[in-house]
Image (cartoon, grey):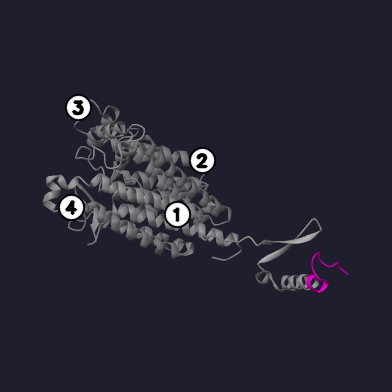
Amino acid sequence: MNAPVAGATPNEGTSRFGGWFRRARTGIDSLPVHLPVRLGGAGIAQTKAAPVRVMGFDQALVWVIVALLTWGLVMVYSASIALPDNPRFVRAGYGPAYFLTRHAASVALACIAALLAFQIPMKTWERAAPWLFVASLLLLVAVLIPHIGINVNGARRWLPLGFMRFQPSELAKLAMVLYAASYMVRKMEIKERFFRAVLPMGIAVVVVGMLVMAEPDMGAFMVIAVIAMGILFLGGVNARMFFLIAALVVVAFGTIVASSPWRRERIFAYLDPWSEEHALGKGYQLSHSLIAIGRGEIFGVGLGGSVEKLHWLPEAHTDFLLAVIGEEFGLVGVLLIIGLFLWLTRRIMHIGRQSIALDRVFSGLVAQGVGVWIGFQAFINMGVNLGALPTKGLTLPLMSFGGSAILMNMAALAIVLRIDYENRVLMRGGRV
């Protein structure tokens, strides 16, 4: 017989233990809130059961996305508040909050689209990948048709949708991520054979590139090409094949730049933006971007205190938003932005590796493709603003003004969160 518990009557101690063991036999859900623990054999202490919470998604990733969106909203307002003083905008009837209102509406629409994209299982995305790629090609053709595509400053890149202008090249980036991942899964067994595995994917990139370059939009073509190459590399294509593809892409871009006089001028302006020839020409944006960042020094001139945004720095609320951040928040602000994007990209790549480890290759390649997309585009935008790369019209993801870019960025990140959610379900022994 068991000895009675110290400090309790025999019947009380027996009933307490008997009741606990009876509950233990019925199942884990019927355990009491307090579990008995013997201390030193002298008595029984009671400790509360630790709460177990299983998160359905990566909260840290969500908060970083929210932080970038919120900071971008504030900076778009700061960078664009003085634009209505320009006679061109006055005639159009723009108010000080015009760009803020449009950007806030784009962010709200993008959040709704992200919620919808999160609900779609990855199996459905895999089946829809080829059709989404075809749809993006049709839209890229449609934007080149007169009276359908909108021509702005000599570029035909937008389709009018009434409430917003949609840029098909942004959809093409997401479509390329999904299609390249689907393609690599389907061709996994022959990825060592160049012509059977890589050549069809190369043809798809060339077709997209020709349509995008006809707009023209070399920046979008660069991102699409890097996405395709990144997924081919991460999908396990032979290293010699990969470097051959990389060399061909470099030659192709070099040929495009060499055959275009105004692109050559941009390269020369980048090499010496302060020269008398370039300071008021192709090097104007870069020189004023560097002035803005230089004025910010370590801690910046304060939110709203930028001078370069007062009609000196063109496109301050889109391509050169980082320059305004550098002027108003200084080196600290720029380093914080770099750190946030570095963490974001690293976390997305980690989710992709985790998915591949669970034998979900398509999901893993999609996540890593999104990481390549966000990371590379942010790198290019930052490099342009800091004078490390030639001027190129690419926005800062999640932050710059632009409805289509925000919409597609949020849809892509929602798919990554869906991948992370399904990973967690599988690791808990569930099914997706």
Q: Is residue 228 above or below residue 335?
A: below
* Residue type pointed to by label 2: Ala
Verify CB contact (< 8 Å) between mark 3 and mark 1.
Answer: no
Q: Residue at x 35, y 43 (%)?
A: 222
Q: Nearer the viewer, mark 3 or mark 1?
A: 1
Label at residue 62 = 1
* Residue type pointed to by label 1: Val
Counting residues from the start of the chain, the first of labels 4 and 2 encountered is 4
In this view, the residue in front, 362 or 204, is 362
Mark 1 to mark 4: distance in Å?
Answer: 32 Å
Q: Nearer the viewer, mark 4 or mark 2?
A: 4
* Residue type pointed to by label 4: Gly
SS class, disc 1: helix
The residue identified by callout 3 is 277
The residue identified by callout 4 is 95
The residue identified by callout 2 is 239
Q: Nearer the viewer, mark 4 or mark 3?
A: 4
SS class, disc 2: helix
In this view, the residue in front, 169 or 58, is 58
